[in-house]
C-alpha cells in the first residue's frame, strides 16, 4: 500500500500506518499465524540467516502482523523503530538487559509501578544497582548519578498519584551523565505525551493498557532510535524470546485505530470526575495532573495535552473506609488493570503496590486510605451515582 505520510495527523497514522497490502487486497490488516516461513531455496535461507538479505525467518525474530503494529506505534511516538514484546514488564526487562552490564547503575523514580520497582531491585542480584529518588526532585536525580550510571528510568504521570517527572530536564541530566533516559508512557500514550520529542532516548509501553483499551491481551513495546532498538535490545528479545504474539499484535492494531478518540474521552471524564471528587466531604485529597490544584499543573499542561484516564484520592477512614467504598461498587469493576473502556477501581496498597515494603510504599505516598480509579467510557452520571453509594458505605463504617 502506498502511503503519503507528509502532514498526516495522529488520528490518521493510528489507522493507516504500517499496512502494506498483500496480493490478496485485504482492507483489514492480515493476521499471520505462523511460526516459520518457507524460503525459495537453500541459498535464500542461508542469506537470511547470515544477515545478508532481509526477510522472514521465524516469528520469534519477526512477524508481518507484529511489524505493522511496530511501525504504527513508532510513527505515533515519533521514533525511528519500535520493538513489540510479550508484556509491558518484558519491555522494561529488554531495555535493562539490552543496555546494562554488571557494575552499571540505574537512577529510577521511587513512584514506579510496584512490579517495575521489584524488577529493578532484582537486577541487583546481577551486579546492576538502582538508586530510587523522588520523581519530582530534579536535584535528587542529579545527585544520584555516578560515573557508573547508565540509565535513568521513570513513568510520568506516576501510578497512582499523578506525580510528574520533567522529561526535558531529566533528559539533560541523563545525557550529561552519559546515560540513557527511558520513560514509561503507558498512562498517556503518544496521543497525550511524546517523550522522545522532549529528549528521552527510549519509550516503553504496556500495550495491555490504553493501546488495547478493552482488556483483551498482554503486550508491550520499546520505541526509540534505529540504532538503540536494533542493537542489543533486539538481540535480547530475539534470543530470550519475550515476543508479542501475532494475534495480540492484531488486537492492538485495532486498539490503536480508536486510541485518539478514546484518550480524549477518558481524559474528559477523568477531569470531570476529579473535580467532582474534590468536593466530596469524605475525600481528603484528589490526585490528577490536569486539576488546576495539582502542584505541577503548569508542567502537566506543558508536556501533556490532557491528563489521561487515571486518578486517585484519599478517603477518610483509612483502609476500612477505602474497602467499604470499593466493595459497595455496583458499576465499577474491582480489578487492578487500567486503560479499559470499563471503569475499574482498586486499592493500590494491597494490590499493585502490595509487594513493596511498608517503607517503600510510604516513600511512594501509597497509604491505606488511597483509592485508584481508571475512568472508562461509561456515563459520568452513572459513575458518580456508583461512587455516592460507596461514600455512603464508607460513612456507615466510621
Image (cartoon, helix red, strand yellow):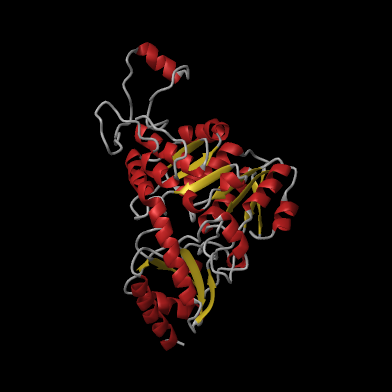
| Residue at the front extreme, as displayed | 7
Say if residue 374 shows up in the picture: no
Residue shown at 62% from the left, 66% from the top: 359
Residue 58 position by quadrant: top left
Q: Is residue 155 above or below residue 58?
A: below
Total count of labels: 0
Residue shown at 51% from the left, 73% from the top: 313
Foreground residue, 113 or 70?
70
Residue 337 position by quadrant: bottom left
Q: Position of residue 229 (x, y in %)?
A: 53, 35
Foreground residue, 155 or 244?
155
Q: Is residue 174 above or below residue 351?
A: above
Residue shown at 39% from the left, 77% from the top: 387
Say if residue 20 shows up in the picture: yes
Left/right of residue 92 with respect to residue 176 in the rendered view = left
Foreground residue, 212 or 258?
258
Q: Is residue 44 above or below residue 359?
A: above
Q: Position of residue 6 (x, y in %)?
A: 46, 36
Left/right of residue 279 with respect to residue 299 in the rendered view = left
| Residue at the left extreme, as displayed | 24
Residue 149 position by quadrant: top right
Q: Name the quadrant of the N terminus.
A: top left
Q: Position of residue 32 (x, y in %)?
A: 30, 34
Residue shown at 41% from the left, 78% from the top: 325
Q: Position of residue 105 (x, y in %)?
A: 67, 45
Foreground residue, 35 or 249?
249
Amino acid at each position: 500500500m502506498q502511503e503519503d505520510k507528509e502532514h498526516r495527523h495522529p488520528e490518521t497514522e493510528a489507522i493507516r500506518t504500517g499496512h502494506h497490502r498483500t496480493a490478496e487486497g485485504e482492507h483489514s490488516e492480515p493476521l499471520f499465524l505462523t511460526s516459520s516461513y518457507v524460503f525459495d531455496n537453500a541459498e535464500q535461507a542461508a542469506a537470511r540467516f547470515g544477515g545478508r538479505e532481509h526477510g522472514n525467518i521465524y516469528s520469534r525474530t519477526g512477524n508481518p502482523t507484529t511489524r505493522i503494529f511496530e511501525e504504527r506505534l513508532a510513527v505515533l511516538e515519533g521514533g525511528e523503530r519500535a520493538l513489540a514484546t510479550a508484556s509491558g514488564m518484558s519491555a522494561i526487562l529488554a531495555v535493562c538487559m539490552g543496555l546494562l552490564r554488571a557494575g552499571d547503575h540505574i537512577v529510577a523514580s521511587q513512584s514506579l509501578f510496584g512490579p517495575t520497582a521489584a524488577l529493578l531491585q532484582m537486577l541487583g542480584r546481577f551486579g546492576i544497582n538502582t538508586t530510587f529518588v523522588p520523581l519530582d526532585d530534579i536535584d535528587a536525580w542529579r545527585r544520584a548519578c555516578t560515573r557508573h550510571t547508565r540509565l535513568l528510568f521513570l513513568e510520568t504521570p506516576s501510578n497512582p498519584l499523578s506525580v510528574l517527572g520533567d522529561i526535558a530536564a531529566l533528559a539533560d541530566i541523563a545525557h550529561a551523565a552519559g546515560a540513557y533516559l527511558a520513560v514509561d508512557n503507558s498512562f498517556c500514550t503518544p496521543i497525550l505525551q511524546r517523550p522522545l520529542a522532549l529528549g528521552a532516548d527510549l519509550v516503553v509501553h504496556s500495550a495491555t493498557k490504553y493501546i488495547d483499551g478493552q482488556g483483551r491481551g498482554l503486550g508491550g513495546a520499546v520505541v526509540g532510535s534505529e540504532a538503540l532498538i536494533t542493537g542489543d535490545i533486539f538481540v535480547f528479545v530475539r534470543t530470550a524470546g519475550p515476543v508479542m504474539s501475532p494475534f495480540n499484535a492484531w488486537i492492538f492494531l485495532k486498539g490503536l485505530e480508536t486510541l485518539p478518540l478514546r484518550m480524549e474521552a477518558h481524559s474528559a471524564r477523568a477531569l470531570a470526575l476529579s473535580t467532582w471528587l474534590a468536593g466530596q466531604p469524605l475525600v481528603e485529597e484528589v490526585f490528577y495532573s490536569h486539576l488546576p490544584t495539582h502542584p505541577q499543573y503548569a508542567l502537566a499542561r506543558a508536556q501533556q495535552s490532557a491528563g489521561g484516564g487515571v486518578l486517585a484520592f484519599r478517603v477518610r477512614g483509612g483502609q476500612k473506609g477505602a474497602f467499604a467504598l470499593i466493595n459497595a461498587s455496583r458499576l465499577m469493576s474491582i480489578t487492578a488493570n487500567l486503560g479499559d473502556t470499563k471503569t475499574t477501581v482498586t486499592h493500590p496498597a494491597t494490590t499493585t503496590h502490595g509487594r513493596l515494603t511498608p517503607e517503600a510504599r510510604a516513600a511512594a505516598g501509597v497509604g491505606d486510605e488511597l483509592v485508584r480509579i481508571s475512568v472508562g467510557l461509561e456515563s459520568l452520571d452513572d459513575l458518580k451515582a456508583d461512587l455516592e453509594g460507596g461514600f455512603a458505605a464508607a460513612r456507615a463504617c466510621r
